Each structure stands twice: as structure tokens, then as C-alpha cells.
Image (cartoon, rainbow, N blue to C red):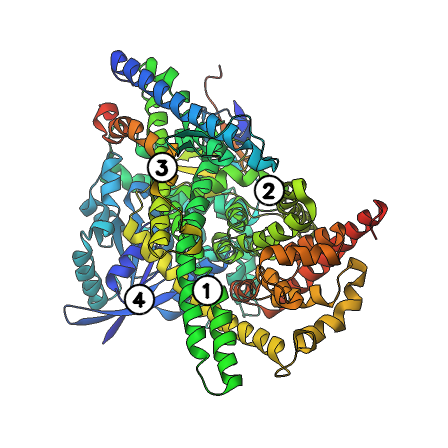
């Protein structure tokens, strides 16, 4: 059982792009955060900032998670390109994980907002852009795939 | 007239949903983990003027005497004679479920079958002819979809009807073939002669006897026809050509197949969402990484998203404590302010992360993922003498040992569960981290992070070694077998999971709350009396002095011992307690005081001791509740103390070799 | 050909011929639907190689290899 091969190729290309994006940002988070993890403070690359906003936060473990999500996407491309329906599984679960991380990071951002509203000590200087992580906005790129995978028509028939 | 209605069925068939629908007041946890309901729950409901007492029995796969929960259900059915027994059947898994129906029919119960999850069955391509099935089984069969509230009114109608008409005694529909029936009959004939055994359903009793059921064998002992029965039963194997237990299981399943020939049409096999998800969730290489991401996301959520709420709770109790300062009587003001509000405030700040962890676990559990997690991790846990289901509680321990220990309830084997409970506190929870950070920061400079990591590592190693040791000594045996159903995935609903989180959380507060309050008050008393004394002269200080000689080999003086007493409330209090004892404020000052008084080896020993010694008050309360035994609770306290002391000695010894004394 | 269930590869099917062993584990195996004559298929092994997921009576069941060892199946058409 399978689906149209040209649809499969499109899915494979899409998965490659999303997978690579997650993996690249995952690697960047690790490189930026390495110094904090080992306690020396010397990271292979400096924090990446645009207009004072941290684009890639130093977060080794978070980076590993992004790489795993990317890997899930990438694992499916071979079967997708052949038009095998099993390949959809990886797009499905990749999207699911991307959605979960989006939800968690969004919840953290909202919670920090609560801390800011109450003006607790640790949140005095918090701005929402601090919590705008790759795991959050990368999900926007993953949305079309998630839609495709979650609407059953593409793979059920 | 009140009719008693028992709900029974395999795990994970939507039994709890139906119970909640029947008795909306009695909220009961609905989980998607096979083997969930352990306690028997009941409630009342009125349907069209008829009063029903609904009893929810544990979900089991069988009714043998070998498992406690199965025996609970069976004894209830045999001894209490409920008016109606509603067997809730997972229609998408009808073959295995009907096997259980036969076990109920053997018991001569007044059975009504609820053919639940009909929607899932339809999705699977099943077309079930309920009427035909009812005809074949000889009992009513009602298709339902409990989650969508379909067919439940009709089910209630049928229950009331069945209760009023009385038992149909559908035993006649059970025909296990001539040879088997003859053997059963020959046993029945002997049983019927015996007065003491007359109260049991004779056919059921005969079958159980043939199966060499422990409980039934026990009942036969000492009766007048014991020898005759033994003779017939011992003969059965040669007559049937095989162990009767095997023959009977064969017969039941072949009868199931025969019945389904006419009542079930299977469509073409579809590729389901479950197939799709398991392809990745149990993938050879991706399975474990994906597992890690899910739990990492859960921990981030539990910790980072709950932080401001912890502050809010802290603020509330601070305000309350300040208000209490207005009480005219000084001692009472201190009791209410410092003792109750101060102490509880400290413990209750942990409520937000605990509740958030509960929410995460509920979502994973209701979806069906936790069964997969156990499957993935079983190999590893088996090597440690534990069951796959022990992994999740261990992992949760890194967040908080309280929800972790509560999560052990899904572990079937009693010994497996006890070991998991006993070693859980060695897994380093979040509350210990502030202590490590302070001490490591004070003593180890650039190596501080490594020192903190080493604590987590030490905790894991100690937990593993003790699990192995307990398995070889006090709790000998093998982990329970891994004969487990992987249920279909379900989309967890936020509403259900939030309710579920709330129930667990409130349950925890109610049960552990008493211990927490008692603990807080005792510690307040110890640290403020004799009234007006300095810290050093308070009971805590005196305890510190009293035990200081004992801890001298570890390099601890009375100050450290006293702070460890304080930290029983919640481990992170150790930091604050050291501040009070040294009469300094702020972490930098505390760190300074530590460095000027102790060498790095004492610092490291203190970190390890904080990790390993007696878990906090909340954990002790949870241990008592979950193990149901003071004996094991006290054992755990002693065990953790001894382990902490021994590890402390080892570290001190290594330190001495390195030249630190 | 008759084999122990733990020796089957993922994707292989067999018909149960005999269940050895005794006690609670054997009973549990039978209660779960593995009796003589039932068709059982190996779906996959856990990522660490054990336990193993099977399909029996249209649902999925897991067994450790040491538990599957007791189950003898006849397998047709070996490759």
C-alpha cells in the first residue's frame, strides 16, 4: 500500500527541509551552550543575537531534543520518496513532537509573563523575546506538514 | 429494593468511564494503562425509579486465585452474589474479552454484556451482530460508546430488567465438548454430595478444581469427599490427554471462535493511527531518543512553567505568616506564623511543579504511551532486577520523589513495587539542587558543575546497587513477567487529564497533608524551644550537639547536623538553616561561612549526605501511604541513613588519602 | 517446522502447538489468548532487543523472550 509517488517526493523534500532546520538549530543551541554545561563558560561560538535578542539560547539539552526531532523527520524521507505509506509515520510523529515542544515553550513563556506581571525578583528584567526559542517558531514551518499528516485523507486512501 | 450491580472487565476497556457516568459523584481515575483500578469503588444511582448500588471491580484478564485483584473480584462475585454483573467488553478486542465472559458465565453470574468501544471496533473494520451474539451467549448484549455517552441509557434499562427478572443461568450455552463435559460432570456429582461445598456454583467449582486452583483446593481440604475428589481430578489428566487447565483454556477459546463465526465480520485490515505511532515510538533506533524528548519536555514544563506559581504560593504564605505576627501571644504567634504557615509554605511551594508533573504523566498515561515506555525500558530494568514499569517512577524521581512514588501503583508485582519505592528517594529530586549549587559553588570553583553532576550520578549508582542488593536479600525473586497488552492509542483530552491531575494532587494533599503538617509543627517546636533560646541552645541545636560526635568521622559539626535536621522538612531548607545557624544572610555569605569552616571534602560529603539521607517529610508520608506499612517506612528511613553514612565515610576516606583531614 | 516463539523473526507467523512451563505465567499466557491452534505474529522487538511485541487475536501483546521460550509454534514456508 502506498500513495502517489510525486506526492511522496514532495513530502520527502518537505521533511528534509524541516528536519534539517530542527537539526541545525539544535546543533547551534549546543555549540552556544556548551560552556555553561561544562562550567567553564567558554563556548565554541558566541551567543547569536539580532538587535539584542537572543536567537539561539544556550541550551545543550534543548539542542539535543531539537536534533532528535529533526532526525525523526529525516528518517522518513527514504520511504516517503518511494511512496511507501510507512514514511508518513515519521512526518506524523515529527510534527507531534514539534507541536509538543511548541506547547511547552509557549506555556513557559506565558508562565514567565505571569512572573513579570507580579514583578517577582527573578522576572524583573524579563521580556517575552527572551523566550522566543527556535523550538517555538520552528513549529510554524512544521505546521503545514502537521496539517498534512493529521488530516487522514492523504495516507488513508 | 436496591439492586447490586457489579462492573467488571479487562483493564482498559472504558470501565471507569462507565462507572463515572453511572455514579457521577464518585470520581474515579480513568487511565489508559492496563491494570489500573486496584481498589474496589462503589456508589449509588437511580434509574427510572429503580435504585442501583454500583460496585466497580478491579480490571483483570482472568479470575484465578494467583493474583490478589483477581481473587478480590472473584470472591466478591461468589460470596456477595450481586444481582447483575455487567461485563464491559472492548469490542475492538472481542476475542480475548469473550473469554472473560465465559469465566463469568462459569460462575453462574447474571451477566449483561456492554459491548463498549464499538466505535473503535468499527474503525478497525469490525461489524458485530449484537443480537446474534446475545443469542449465542444467552445473555443480553448492548453496544455502547461510553466516551460519547452512547448506549448507556439502554445499558441501564437492560441492567434494571435483568435485575428484576433474575438470573437466566446461561450456563447451558457453555459446551466445552463431550469429553470435557463428562469429566466436569463427574466432579460435579461428587461436589453435589458434599454439604459444605453446596453453596458454591457446582460447575464452576468443578472447573476450578480441575484447574488446580489454590483457593478452591484449600476449600476442599478436610471435607468428607476430599479423597473422591482427588481421585477424579487426578484421573482427569489421563482422560483428557492433557493438563485440564490447558484443555479448558483451549475449549473456551475455541468456543469464542465458534460464536464469532456467526456474529463477527472482519473487514479488510486497516493501517491505524496506533500502527503509525508505534512505527516511530518503538522504532529500533528512534524509540529511545523519542522517549527522552517526551520526558524532557515534561520536565521543562513541570519546572519552568511552574516557577512563578511557586513564587505566588510562597508570597501567600509569607503574607499569612506576617499577619500571624500580629497575634498578641508570642508563642502562639510563632506557632502559627513560623510553624504552620512558614513550614507549610515551604512544602507547599512544591505543589505547582508536582501538579504540573501529574498533568504531564496523566497526558502520557491517558494516551497509552506509558505502556510503550515500559516496553522500551524493560530490558534495562530487568537487568537491575526490576520490571519495565519501574522505569517511569525512577525517572519522575528527578523531578520530585512524591509523584514518583505515587506512580509505582501501576507496578503489578508486590516486590517489584516495594523495591522501586525503597530506592526511589536516592534519585536526586529538584529540591536538592539548590543545596548542591550552594556547596559546589563555595568549594569547587570551575569544577562546580561537575560536582553537581556527580551527585546525580551517585544517586543513580546507589539506587541501582541497592535495588540489586534488595533483590538478592530481603525481597528475593524475579521481576513479574512482561505479559502486557499494548493498548490502542487514544487522544488524551485536556479536560480529562486536568481532572485526573487534580484528583491525584488533591489526593496527595489530603493523605500526605497530615504528615506534612505534623512534620512542620514538630520541626518548628524543635527549633524554637526552649522558648527564647539561641539556635545553638534550641532543641535542634541540642540534637546537633548530641549527634555531632557520631558524625565527627564525616567531618560534620553540630551546625551541619542541626541544618540536616531542619532539612527534613524539605531538603533545600538546609541552605536557609545554615544561614540561620551562622547568622549570616544571602547565599554568598553562607558560602563564605562554609569555606572558612570546612575543607572541600566535608563539602562534598555534605552534598552526598544531603542526597542520600532520610527523604523529606512529604516523601516519608508518601512511603507510608503507598507501602501501607510503617515497617517498610521505618526501614526506608534507617536504610537511607545508613547508606548516607557509609557513603560519607567512603568519601572522607578517599579525601584523607588525598591529604584532606 | 516447530520452533520456540522467541526464535521467530519480526514479520514471521506461527501456529501455537504447545505451551510448556507451569504456574501463574503459563496461565496468564493462556488467559491472554495464546492457546493451541492460535495464530501468532511477531511484530517487532523493543529497541533494546527484549521484550518482543506480538499480534494475537487482533491485538498487540508483549512477552519477554524468556516467557516466549515456553511457547512452541509451527512455522510454514521457511525462507
Query: Between tags 1 and 4, which lies in front?
Result: 1
Residue count near mark 4 (Cα–Cα under 10 Å), binned few <14, some 14–19, many ≥20: some
Q: What's the distance in space between the residues labelled 1 and 3, CA to CA?
A: 30 Å
Are dots 4 and 2 on a single chain? yes
Query: Dot 2 lies on which element?
Result: helix
Q: Secondary structure at mark 3?
A: loop
How far, Cα to Cα, is label 1 from label 4? 27 Å
| Residue under pointer 3 | A132
Give me the disc on residue B382. 2
Element on which disc 1 rests: helix
Q: Compared to A55, does A125 lie above or below?
A: below
Asked if the residue under mark 3 is in contact with the one under mark 2, i.e. CB atoms within 8 Å, the reply is no
- 3D distance between C-alphas at marks 2 and 3: 42 Å
Q: Position of residue B481 (x, y in %)?
A: 54, 45
Establish whether labels 1 and 3 are both on one chain: no
Provide the chain ID for the residue under circle 3.
Answer: A
Which quadrant of the figure has residue B368? top left
Which comes sooner in the sequence, label 4 or label 2? Answer: 4
Give the chain of mark 2.
Answer: B
Amino acid at each position: 500500500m502506498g500513495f502517489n509517488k510525486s506526492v511522496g517526493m514532495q513530502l520527502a523534500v518537505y521533511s528534509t527541509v524541516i528536519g534539517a532546520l530542527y537539526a541545525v538549530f539544535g546543533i547551534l543551541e549546543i555549540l552556544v551552550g556548551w560552556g555553561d554545561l561544562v562550567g567553564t563558560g567558554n563556548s565554541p561560538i558566541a551567543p547569536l543575537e539580532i538587535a539584542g535578542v537572543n536567537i539561539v539560547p544556550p541550551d545543550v539539552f534543548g539542542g539535543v531534543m531539537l536534533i532528535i526531532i529533526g532526525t525523526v523527520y529525516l528518517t522518513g524521507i527514504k520511504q516517503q520518496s518511494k511512496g511507501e505509506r510507512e514514511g508518513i509515520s515519521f512526518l506524523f510523529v515529527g510534527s507531534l513532537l514539534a507541536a509538543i515542544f511548541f506547547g511547552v515553550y509557549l506555556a513557559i513563556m506565558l508562565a514567565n509573563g505571569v512572573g513579570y506581571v507580579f514583578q517577582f525578583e527573578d522576572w524583573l528584567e524579563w521580556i517575552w523575546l527572551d523566550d522566543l526559542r527556535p523550538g517555538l517558531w520552528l513549529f510554524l514551518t512544521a505546521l503545514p506538514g502537521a496539517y498534512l499528516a493529521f488530516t487522514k485523507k492523504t495516507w488513508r486512501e | 429494593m436496591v439492586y447490586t450491580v457489579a462492573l467488571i472487565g479487562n483493564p482498559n476497556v472504558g470501565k471507569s468511564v462507565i462507572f463515572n457516568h453511572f455514579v457521577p459523584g464518585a470520581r474515579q481515575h480513568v487511565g489508559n494503562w492496563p491494570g489500573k483500578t486496584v481498589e474496589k469503588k462503589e456508589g449509588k444511582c437511580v434509574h427510572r425509579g429503580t435504585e442501583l448500588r454500583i460496585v466497580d471491580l478491579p480490571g483483570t484478564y482472568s479470575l484465578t486465585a494467583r493474583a490478589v485483584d483477581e481473587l478480590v473480584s472473584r470472591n466478591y462475585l461468589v460470596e456477595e452474589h450481586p444481582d447483575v454483573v455487567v461485563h464491559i467488553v472492548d469490542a475492538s478486542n472481542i476475542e480475548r474479552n469473550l473469554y472473560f465472559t465465559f469465566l463469568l458465565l462459569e460462575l453462574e453470574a447474571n451477566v449483561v454484556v456492554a459491548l463498549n468501544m464499538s466505535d473503535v471496533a468499527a474503525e478497525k473494520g469490525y461489524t458485530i451482530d449484537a443480537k446474534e451474539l446475545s443469542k449465542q451467549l444467552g445473555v443480553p448484549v448492548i453496544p455502547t460508546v461510553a466516551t460519547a455517552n452512547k448506549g448507556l441509557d439502554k445499558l441501564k434499562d437492560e441492567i434494571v430488567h435483568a435485575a428484576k427478572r433474575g438470573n437466566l443461568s446461561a450456563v447451558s450455552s457453555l459446551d466445552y465438548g463431550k469429553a470435557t463435559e463428562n469429566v466436569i460432570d463427574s466432579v460435579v456429582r461428587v461436589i453435589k454430595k458434599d454439604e459444605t461445598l453446596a453453596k458454591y456454583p457446582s460447575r464452576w467449582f468443578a472447573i476450578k478444581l480441575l484447574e488446580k486452583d489454590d483457593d478452591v483446593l484449600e476449600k476442599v481440604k478436610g471435607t468428607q469427599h476430599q479423597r473422591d475428589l482427588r481421585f477424579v481430578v487426578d484421573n482427569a489428566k489421563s482422560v483428557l490427554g492433557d493438563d485440564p487447565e490447558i484443555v479448558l483454556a483451549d475449549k473456551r477459546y475455541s468456543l469464542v471462535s465458534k460464536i464469532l463465526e456467526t456474529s463477527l465480520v472482519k473487514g479488510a485490515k486497516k493501517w491505524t493511527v496506533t500502527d503509525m505511532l508505534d512505527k516511530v515510538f518503538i522504532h529500533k533506533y528512534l524509540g529511545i531518543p523519542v522517549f527522552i524528548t517526551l520526558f524532557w519536555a515534561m520536565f521543562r514544563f513541570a519546572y519552568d512553567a511552574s516557577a512563578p506559581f511557586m513564587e505566588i504560593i510562597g508570597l501567600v504564605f509569607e503574607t499569612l505568616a506576617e499577619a500571624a505576627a500580629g497575634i498578641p501571644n508570642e508563642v502562639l504567634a510563632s506557632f502559627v506564623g513560623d510553624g504552620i504557615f512558614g513550614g507549610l509554605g515551604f512544602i507547599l511551594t512544591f505543589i505547582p511543579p508536582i501538579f504540573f508533573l501529574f498533568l504531564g504523566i496523566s497526558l502520557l498515561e491517558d494516551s497509552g504511551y506509558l505502556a510503550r515506555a515500559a516496553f522500551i525500558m524493560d530490558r534495562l530494568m530487568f537487568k537491575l532486577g526490576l520490571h519495565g514499569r519501574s522505569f517511569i517512577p525512577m525517572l519522575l524521581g528527578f523531578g520530585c520523589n512524591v509523584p514518583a512514588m505515587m506512580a509505582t501503583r501501576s507496578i503489578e508485582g508486590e516486590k517489584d513495587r516495594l523495591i522501586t519505592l525503597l530506592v526511589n528517594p536516592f534519585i536526586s529530586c529538584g529540591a536538592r539542587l539548590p543545596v548542591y549549587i550552594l556547596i559546589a559553588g563555595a568549594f569547587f570553583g570551575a569544577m562546580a558543575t561537575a560536582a553537581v553532576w556527580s551527585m546525580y550520578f551517585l544517586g543513580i549508582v546507589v539506587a541501582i546497587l541497592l535495588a540489586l542488593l534488595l533483590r538478592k536479600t530481603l525481597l528475593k525473586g524475579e521481576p513479574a513477567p512482561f505479559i502486557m497488552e499494548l493498548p490502542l492509542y487514544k487522544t488524551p483530552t485536556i479536560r480529562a487529564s486536568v481532572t485526573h491531575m487534580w484528583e491525584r494532587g488533591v489526593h496527595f494533599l489530603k493523605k500526605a497533608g497530615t504528615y506534612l503538617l505534623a512534620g512542620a509543627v514538630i520541626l518548628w517546636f524543635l527549633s524554637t524551644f526552649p522558648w527564647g533560646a539561641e539556635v545553638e541552645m534550641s532543641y535542634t541545636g541540642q540534637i546537633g550537639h548530641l549527634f555531632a560526635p557520631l558524625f565527627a568521622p564525616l567531618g560534620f559539626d553540630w551546625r551541619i547536623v542541626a541544618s540536616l535536621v531542619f532539612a527534613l522538612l524539605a531538603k533545600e531548607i538546609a541552605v536557609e538553616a545554615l544561614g540561620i545557624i551562622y547568622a549570616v544572610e544571602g547565599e554568598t555569605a553562607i558560602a563564605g561561612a562554609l569555606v572558612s569552616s570546612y575543607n572541600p571534602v566535608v563539602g562534598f560529603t555534605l552534598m552526598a549526605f544531603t542526597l542520600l539521607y532520610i527523604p523529606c517529610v512529604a516523601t516519608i508520608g508518601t512511603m507510608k501511604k503507598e507501602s501501607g506499612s510503617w515497617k517498610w517506612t521505618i526501614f526506608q528511613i534507617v536504610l537511607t541513613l545508613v547508606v548516607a553514612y557509609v557513603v560519607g565515610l567512603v568519601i572522607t576516606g578517599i579525601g584523607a588519602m588525598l591529604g584532606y583531614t | 517446522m516447530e520452533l520456540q516463539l522467541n526464535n521467530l523473526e519480526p514479520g514471521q507467523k506461527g501456529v501455537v502447538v504447545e505451551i510448556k512451563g507451569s504456574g501463574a505465567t503459563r496461565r496468564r499466557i493462556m488467559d491472554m489468548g495464546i492457546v493451541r491452534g492460535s495464530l501468532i505474529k511477531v511484530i517487532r522487538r523493543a529497541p533494546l532487543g527484549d521484550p518482543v511485541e506480538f499480534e494475537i487475536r487482533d491485538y498487540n501483546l508483549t512477552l519477554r523472550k524468556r516467557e516466549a521460550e515456553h511457547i512452541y509454534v509451527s512455522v510454514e514456508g521457511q525462507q
